[in-house]
Image: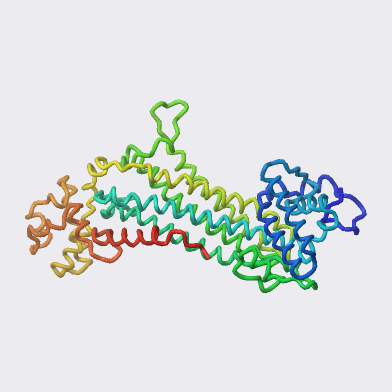
Amino acid sequence: MATPSRSGVFSQATDRRVERFTESISFDRRLYAHDIQGSIAHAQMLAKVGILTAEECEQISVTLKQIGKEIENDIFPFNIALEDIHMHIESALIERLGDVGRKLHTGRSRNDQVATDIRLWVRDALDRIDAGLLNLQRAFFERCEADADVILPGYTHLQRAQPVLAPHYWLAYCEKLERDRGRVRDCRRRTNVCSLGVAALAGTTLPIDRHDVAERLQFAEVAANSLDVSSDRDFVVESAFVLSLIAAHLSTWAEEWILWSTVEFNFLKLPHQFCTGSSIMPQKINPDVLELTRGKSARVIGHLQHLLVLIKGLPLAYNRDLQEDKPPLFDSFETVELCLELAAPLVAGATLNREGIAEKLEKGYLDATTLMEYLIFQKGIAQRTAHHLVGALVKDAMQRGVSLAELPLEALQAAHPDLDENVRSILGVKNAVEAFKSYGSTAPVEVRRQIERWRGILYGQEGLPLG
């Protein structure tokens, strides 16, 4: 079969094994809508500069839209001999319009066509990821009021460290996800550059108008160097990095909640519609969605390495190796998007086990650091000295099997004679939380300020475009 990509220079037909080896239609067909969008804009520009007539442009545009509807409705025939989605659409156009269809590819190459299609696809995909991140932020935020009075043990090294208010914990994930959204916006800005019209690598002698095409496709910029942009996949690699970090954040959250839902922690009850059972143990309620969220992060991170290795040895400009950028790119976006889709309702549907948390909250000497800082500020004791004194008091309390607040006054004064009953005002988990003062801390007044700040971020700017 003769294809638009094979010129008269060839004396033999393509080997069937080569067709199977080089095809990408099995995965790049998802670019069809963006390929048609870009082709219509290109045709309109060709008509504007006089390379196509207005009638030819209209014929091409109408026929491309018909082809798009056939693909959307799954009635379009695919054939690996046509290699990719671009050749499928162009071949169908030529079959239906003859020479008019053959004019569409004037002033462009598959190199810039593919790059443009991917940029359009990634731009839309980044918008969906941003929406998913916003939904998850809102799910965390909307827990703040209901859980405002819950105190959680904060951990370092997975050892109990200091008490934190539950809303402070929920907003910590809002902060992580906001950094993710910032990276999405940055990546989108560098993606939102028009490649179309650079042709194979050097540009074209034809009087095309690349800025017109960029405007029609709502690109913010036009790529300035044809040699660079025909092979540029930085935006693909950057997307993979952004998605990898999102996946890593989701994995961290999933790991915590897997632990919290165990009998050993007993902090959290997961919504049953996001859990599965065991084929043999009838009592099991397994956190499979969280486990797969954690597991799928490895897949996304692996795709980033794939893409970095793919581009590391390529000379300018386009090389066919770049065909292999699409499977990891598509899978990374689709994996993270699905994880986000499930994460938001899972966060919203989980329930904190207030009794289980409160039952063990005074264990672990979460108020030890507060006592140390009391000695520093109220008694003028040097930090390292206060650190040692409180460590000795914790040791005494452990030996007695009591909390710091339950130590008798004589034990406290044995550590430092200036200590009196007033120290008990900062001992105990609730008092320790009330004692915090610094900006961004878990102090109740600070957490309330953070809640109001996030209310403005998450609901006051709704609907703003990424730009």
Q: Residue furthest front?
A: 55
Q: Residue furthest right?
A: 11
Q: Is residue 269 above or below residue 3?
A: above
Residue 437 falls left or right of residue 82:
left
Res 363 visible: yes
* Most foreground residue, 225 or 438: 225
Res 315 visible: no
Q: How many marks?
A: 0
* Most foreground residue, 263 or 337: 337
In the rendering, at what x and y percent does residue 86 appear?
74, 54
In the rendering, at what x and y percent does residue 168 appear?
31, 56
Q: Is residue 321 above or below residue 350?
A: below
In the rendering, at what x and y percent does residue 39 appear?
72, 59
Q: Quadrant of residue 453?
A: bottom left
Q: Residue at x 67, y 71 (%)?
A: 211
In the rendering, at what x and y percent does residue 393 appear?
16, 55
Say how the picture is coloured. rainbow
Q: Residue at x 35, y 43 (%)?
A: 260
Q: Residue at x 41, y 26 (%)?
A: 282
